[in-house]
């Protein structure tokens, strides 16, 4: 099977990285703006149809490249950094030199180009390209079309505003990502990737609230003879067993089941709106799936098993009582020899 083309990347040696949807949105806004200008110009005499059609075509090509997502990002950035400023500066220069006037839509195109640069290039490169573009455009306007200076000032203001908002947006985005990362870390077990006890309690409370018309089932798992695994094979092997059990239990239970590392070698699985027969099938499937887990080490390690207790919310009153009932049944399974559920 052939390998698909590489997605957008920063440079030939860096890992692939998808462009933010914000880049695509800015390109679509550019396309929409030039399309509206083209339609307006066509209805009112069509003095700049060729130029506006070219601008619309550039915007459409940019949208297509971003949607396609298979062009090296460093090539796209380089093309934008040179082609767009040179193109729009050429439009302004030709109009100013030939007629002594720069059509008002060209100044909007200047601002749109700065927005595209800001959305696509690194901040410093975008700032340099914008400054060079506005300086060159300013020289052309002041030299051949001084009456258009107010429009140039407006375009420069828009370029500065775009830069300010872009920097502000980047800062807010970074802060939001950092806050989200901290939130995820606070409720996630670092070893297994499941919810930790704190996150699990929040999820269970929400599950109980959502399932008022149905019932909640919980399955409490405890790895059999886990201390012996740590003592015989080492704590690294024990950590790997915990991770594998969490993955095996999650896959066997299904996507609708919440997996929580309840503590030590215990995992709590919870789900809502279930019939007892369905919950029994899930419990049997989970216990059976864990048997396929092997302790890592030299050769084929011994199989891992769990003892499990299944309980339903309509058997008790409240979340704490529900978990206690599952805990009691889990210990009953363990006392019966393990590798089973009660």
Image (tube, rainbow, N blue to C red):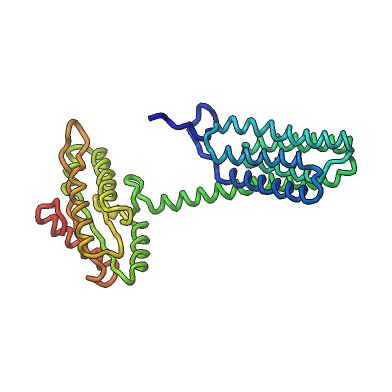
Q: Nearer the viewer, residue 160 or 145?
A: 145
Left or right for 148, reference 234: right
The quarter in which the C terminus is drawn is: bottom left
Residue at 54% x, 29% y is: 11
- Would residue 152 be visible to someone looking at this image? no
Residue at the extreme left: 336
Q: Quadrant of the N terminus?
A: top left
Q: Residue, x 20% and y 62% (percent of image)?
A: 277
Tell me: 178 left or right of 145: left
- Residue at 17%, 38% in the rendered image: 232
Left or right, 341 with respect to 29, comes to: left
- Return the x and y of residue 252 as percentages of the image width and height: 25, 50
Identify the image quadrant of residue 105. top right
In the picture, residue 147 is in which quadrant?
A: top right
Identify the residue at image location x=50%, y=48%.
Answer: 178
* Horizontal arrangement in the rendering, residue 256 relative to residue 161 (left or right): left
Q: Position of residue 269 (x, y in %)?
A: 27, 56
Please provide percent x and percent y for residue 129. 70, 35
- 181 versus 201 height, above or below: above
Task: Give the answer, above or below, for where 125 lies relative to 32.
Answer: above
Q: Nearer the viewer, residue 1 or 16?
A: 1
């Amino acid at each position: 099977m052939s390998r698909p083309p590489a997605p957008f990347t920063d440079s030939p040696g860096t890992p692939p990285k998808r462009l933010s949807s914000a880049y695509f949105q800015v390109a679509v806004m550019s396309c929409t703006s030039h399309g509206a200008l083209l339609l307006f110009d066509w209805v009112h005499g069509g003095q700049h149809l060729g130029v506006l059609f070219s601008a619309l075509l550039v915007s459409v090509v940019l949208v297509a490249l971003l949607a396609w997502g298979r062009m090296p990002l460093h090539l796209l950035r380089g093309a934008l950094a040179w082609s767009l400023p040179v193109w729009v500066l050429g439009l302004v220069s030709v109009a100013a030199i030939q007629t002594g006037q720069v059509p008002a839509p060209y100044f909007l195109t200047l601002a749109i180009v700065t927005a595209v640069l800001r959305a696509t290039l690194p901040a410093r490169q975008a700032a340099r390209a914008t400054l060079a573009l506005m300086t060159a455009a300013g020289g052309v306007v002041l030299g051949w079309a001084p009456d258009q200076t107010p429009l140039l000032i407006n375009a420069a203001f828009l370029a500065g505003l775009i830069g300010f908002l872009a920097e502000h947006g980047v800062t807010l985005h970074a802060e939001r990502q950092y806050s989200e990362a901290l939130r995820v870390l606070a409720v996630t077990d670092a070893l297994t990737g499941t919810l930790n006890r704190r996150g699990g309690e929040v999820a269970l409370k929400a599950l109980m609230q959502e399932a008022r018309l149905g019932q909640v089932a919980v399955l409490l798992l405890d790895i059999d003879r886990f201390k012996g695994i740590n003592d015989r094979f080492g704590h690294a092997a024990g950590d790997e067993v915990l991770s594998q059990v969490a993955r095996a239990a999650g896959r066997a239970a299904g996507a609708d089941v919440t997996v929580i590392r309840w503590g030590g070698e215990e995992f709590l699985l919870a789900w809502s709106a279930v019939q007892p027969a369905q919950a029994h099938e899930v419990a049997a499937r989970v216990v059976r799936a864990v048997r396929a887990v092997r302790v890592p080490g030299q050769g084929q390690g011994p199989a891992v098993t769990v003892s499990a207790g299944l309980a339903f919310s309509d058997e008790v009153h409240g979340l704490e009582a529900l978990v206690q009932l599952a805990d009691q049944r889990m210990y009953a399974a363990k006392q019966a020899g393990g590798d089973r559920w009660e």
